[in-house]
């Protein structure tokens, strides 16, 4: 009888341990889901603040827009704003950092392995993704192209740093292209600056023009200009 009682006790103990472990795992999963949901909510709120600020900066200029206006447009309390940012400068810098991140995920290395799509097609897709992102966010384009800041202002210097980073991305892509034989030998830094200048001019024209455009076609024109210039091919051979 005592042996049976001991065995039952051991079985109950094992069952209790299994149930406890299962409940512990469920509890951890619940906590993880709750944390993930809370993190997603924080990210969403942060983006809402950035979008509100970006729109105001583009419309009124960085100096003319105030934190109070950002708070009003975002529909948040003042305390909520300061949970995410400690100043207007921090908001501006975060807008540029997010833009760099969005550009980086859209630039994919050209695959030259057998069976991969033609390099020209992959290049077109890269440029199309970048242009689609930039042109879908006209407030961002207005902000970085016509921010209304004096050249020596700290924020203007940060915009310059933003474009310097983009230029580095282009130069890196050119260097990679040369290494795999799909880009002719050139000064990657200088060529990157020339390409970026063309892109900036094209974006400025597109946001000011009152006409519809196809992003893929714009990308094709940009790539064609970078590869062949504007001279008719027959003339270049004469």
Image (cartoon, rainbow, N blue to C red):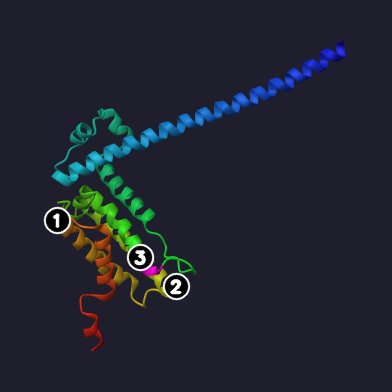
Marks 1 and 3, the one that precedes in the sequence = 3
Residue 220 in the image, given as x and y percentages of width and height: 27, 66
41 versus 235 height, above or below: above
Marks 1 and 3, how far apart in space? 25 Å
Q: Secondary structure at mark 1?
A: loop
Please name the residue that numbered disc 3 is placed on: 123
Residue 47 in the image, given as x and y percentages of width and height: 31, 39
114 versus 146 height, above or below: below
**Tag in front: 1 or 3:** 1
Please name the residue that numbered disc 2 is placed on: 180
Looking at the magenta stretch, what is its main secondary structure?
helix
Q: Are marks 1 and 2 in contact (CB under 8 Å)?
A: no
Magenta residues (range):
118-123
In the image, 105 versus 46, the foreground residue is 105
In the image, 26 versus 152, the foreground residue is 26
Task: Determine the image quadrant of residue 171.
Answer: bottom left
In the image, 66 versus 179, the foreground residue is 179
Whether 144 is among the magenta residues is no
Marks 1 and 2, the one that precedes in the sequence = 2
Residue 179 in the image, given as x and y percentages of width and height: 44, 73
């Amino acid at each position: 009888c005592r042996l049976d009682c001991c065995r039952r006790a051991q079985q109950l103990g094992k069952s209790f341990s299994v149930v406890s472990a299962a409940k512990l795992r469920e509890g951890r999963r619940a906590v993880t889901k709750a944390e993930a949901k809370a993190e997603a909510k924080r990210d969403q709120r942060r983006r809402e603040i950035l979008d509100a600020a970006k729109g105001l900066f583009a419309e009124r200029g960085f100096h003319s827009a105030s934190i109070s206006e950002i708070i009003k447009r975002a529909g948040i309390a003042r305390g909520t704003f300061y949970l995410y940012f400690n100043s207007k400068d921090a908001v501006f810098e975060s807008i540029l950092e997010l833009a760099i991140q969005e550009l980086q995920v859209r630039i994919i290395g050209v695959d030259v392995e057998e069976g991969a799509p033609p390099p020209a097609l992959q290049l077109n897709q890269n440029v199309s993704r970048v242009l689609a992102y930039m042109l879908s966010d006209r407030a961002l384009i207005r902000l970085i192209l016509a921010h209304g800041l004096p050249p020596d202002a700290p924020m203007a210097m940060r915009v310059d740093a933003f474009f310097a980073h983009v230029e580095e991305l282009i130069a890196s892509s050119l260097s990679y292209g040369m290494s795999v034989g799909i880009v002719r030998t050139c000064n990657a830094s200088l060529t990157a600056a020339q390409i970026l200048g063309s892109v900036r001019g094209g974006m400025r024209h597109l946001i000011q023009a009152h006409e519809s455009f196809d992003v893929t076609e714009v990308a094709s024109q940009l790539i064609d200009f970078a590869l062949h210039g504007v001279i008719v091919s027959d003339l270049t051979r004469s």
